[in-house]
Image (cartoon, rainbow, N blue to C red):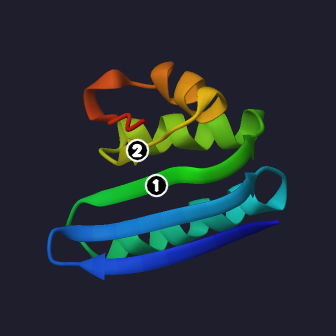
Amino acid sequence: MLKITVSNTDPGTIFVLSGRLAGPWVDEVRDCWLKQKKHESAPCHVDLREVTFIDEAGTMLLSQMSRGGVTIQASGCLTSAIVQNLDKTSVCNYE
């Protein structure tokens, strides 16, 4: 299960993910991101601080998002380790 909370702020859009970024939820996050990207040129941010698991497809999506200019916030051993292996030019790690 994954909860996706979308906030439209002055500097851009923030996606707060809570739960497991795995299975069909990866496609759901991708769809949300692509819709945002299509309708807005403002920056996009993903907050993974409440994510408990990321599968391989989720990791690949995060990598694609990072290469697309999305900043990513993570904490904890699992998400921080995954995020550290993404394109570091557009990733922010928060403990």
Number of other residues with Cα within 10 Å of mark 2, as a class: few under 14, some 14 to 19, many 20 or more? many
Q: Quick check: 47 left or right of 37?
A: right
Give the image quarter of residue 38.
bottom left
Q: Is residue 1 above or below residue 91?
A: below
Establish if 83 lies above or below 32: above
Q: Are marks 1 and 2 in contact (CB under 8 Å)?
A: no
Q: Quadrant of residue 73?
A: top left
Q: Name the N-terminal-most of marks 1 and 2.
A: 1
In terms of depth relative to the viewer, which is nearer, 4 or 78?
78
On-image quarter of the C terminus? top left
Q: Position of residue 15 (x, y in %)?
A: 46, 66
Report the residue marked by disc 1: 47
> Measuring 29% from the left and 44% from the top, which residue is drawn there?
69
The residue tagged with tag 1: helix, strand or loop?
strand
Classify 93 as above or below 68. Answer: above
Q: In the rendering, at what x and y percent does residue 6 appear?
A: 46, 77
Q: Is residue 32 left or right of residue 7?
A: right
Percent coordinates x, y for residue 78 in the rendering = 66, 30
Q: Which residue is mark 2?
A: 72
Q: Residue at x 50, y 65 (%)?
A: 16
Callout 2, which amino acid? Ile
Q: Which residue is at the far left?
A: 10
